[in-house]
Amino acid sequence: MEDILIIAPYPELEKDAIQLRGKTEIKFSVILGDSKIPYKQQINPLTRVIISRGGTAKSLRDSLDLPVVDVPVTPADILRSISIVAKSGYKKIAIITPANILSKTNHTFQLSEQLHLIFATGVEGQIENTVKRLIQDEKVEAIIGDRVSTQIALQHRVHGHLLTSGEESLLRALETATNVLLAQTRERAKIKELQSILNVINDAVLTIDPNGIITVSNDSAKRIFNFSQEDIVGKSYSDIITDSHLLKIIGEKKEERNLLHSVANGKKIVVNQIPIYVDSVFHGSVGIYQEISKIQNLELNIRKRLNDRGLFAKSTFDDFVTINSRMEQVVSEARLYAKSEGTVLIYGESGTGKELFAQSIHNASGRQTGPFVSVNCAALNENLLESELFGYMEGSFTGALKGGRPGLFELAHGGSLFLDEIGEISPQFQAKLLRVLQEKEVRRIGGDRVIPIDVRVICATNKSLYDLSQDGKFREDLYYRLCTLEIDLIPLRYRKEDIIPMAISFLKVEMLREKRTLFWGNTDVFLPLLDHKWPGNARELQNAIHRLVICTPEGKITQNHVSQLIDFVSRRKRTGNTLEVEISNDFREMETEIWRKLLDVFDGDKERLCQTYQISKTTLWRKLNSENEK
């Protein structure tokens, strides 16, 4: 079935259209309009464009949603009709049509003493009055016009001649209809493309026109709102949406962003309703609705992936507990440093929270949405540290993974890289690190391609890099590259006023971890904590509080419990009373002997020995094997 349908208002037009089929490649159907039968019953449902003329075309346009193309009236059509009527002996002729055939005119032309022409346009609903006026006042003898005009003329016993359209007019109308079809096809393709895009979006989307009719809807909208109808496009939103609050939001025609709302089926959604105004005129609105559960699951997955790769900084400056004025000043300086892009060097004894500061600086910086990568430089030998930081290509060394591996500098791109115990790296590796910091690019081991990086470096150490540089153990140029912004963390023994507040903070954390509920009368119960020097700083204090939570049998913590805790901690520090070491000319041998005897005192428990003396396992290994360093 053809997409174009010609509805002929009179038999001659039907005949001309049928004859035109053999002269054009444009496919179309033709029917003779019957005013007694509703047009909708005469039209095939597959029809996409209608061609008609005069009053019939206007009536079709008013009653159908399909585009209607008018058959034009050419000057040749008018002249032909005038010639026919004039040859029939009529001297005063009126040409009258609806406005959609001829533009609005009202002119009289006297071509000769025998021939007068009057052009008039009949306004809808007033054609009969126009015809009567021309007959009675102007004394016209013949009427040329459409079917309505000529029928009225005949009723008043005046000659009526139907103004017909010729083949040229029909062909022009068919070409216009073909262009309309092409535009429709393009528009449908665009709509289909848009619908496909919308249907892969998890957010619900509804667009509404100025009359409240839904023009676009996607599958997520049906799922989120549980629409009962399969296709809601073309329906009024007030008939489809039952949620009164949402109806009010849409009806107010105001912008709403990130509004939390619960729909009837129990789902929580975020509403974004955007009205569209052009030159202060309302042209509809677009609604985007997100399920809270989807947002939460997406955030959870992102956080899980970052945590799995160790690229997530969880601590912020709000996690610090201090009432010491000097420490408060240190935190304030760190907040200022976070806003810059300078390299930060954090000094502090073991357990003072160097990584906590590093994470907080990252989370307060402009890189907070980027990765946070942490590496302990003392935990790896030089070769391992190089492959970890710079990455490697496949086959670059024995054991290299297939396909190679990106280094931590690459993984930290756009974020921050925390290098802990930076003072432990060898002079050879210091030179390689300096080059990366200067050039802002890395090359994987075994590779020949230079990879640009955008990384902020934060370093930490419990040694004085300045002293090491003066002793020739740390490169001066690297030291000055790292010490742009320095932070010196204060040991816990020099800020005793922080011990009890920190202990209470740790206590709350450990109770949650152990799923225990303990309480205490007042903070005086924690006074025995002040009698200990806490050489392990905050880390040692947290470990002690963890033991207190586990070992307190009753629901209430007493001062006696805390005193017993301090006795245990202090006694653990005095595991061996004395150590006998033979004096040697080689100090390294003496030191190695001390560490070996200490290990015996701790029954070979290296982890407890390292924790007690606040050293890494790598450092202990080096102390126990000093001959490797000779």
Image: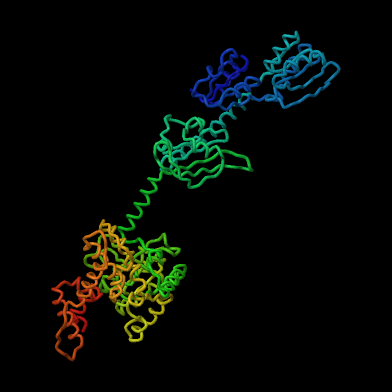
Choose between 373 and 261: the one closer to the eye.
261
Percent position (x, y) of residue 386? 30, 71
- Residue 590 shows in this picture: yes
Q: Which color scheme does this rendered protein use?
A: rainbow
Choose between 243 and 192: the one closer to the eye.
243
Q: Can you say whether 474 is above or below 437 in the image?
A: below
Q: Can you say whether 248 is above or below 146 in the image?
A: below
Query: What residue occupies the far bottom of the structure in this picture?
Result: 585
- Residue 201 shows in this picture: no
Q: State the residue at coordinates (38%, 49%).
A: 296
Percent position (x, y) of residue 181? 54, 31
Find residue 159 and report its image quarter: top right
Q: State the residue at coordinates (29%, 66%).
A: 392
Q: State the residue at coordinates (56%, 30%).
A: 178
Query: What residue occupies the far right of the structure in this picture?
Result: 113
Find residue 81 and report its image quarter: top right
Percent position (x, y) of residue 195? 45, 38
Image-based side of 55 in relation to 370, left or right: right
In this figure, what is the number of numbered marks? 0
Find residue 625 and report its image quarter: bottom left
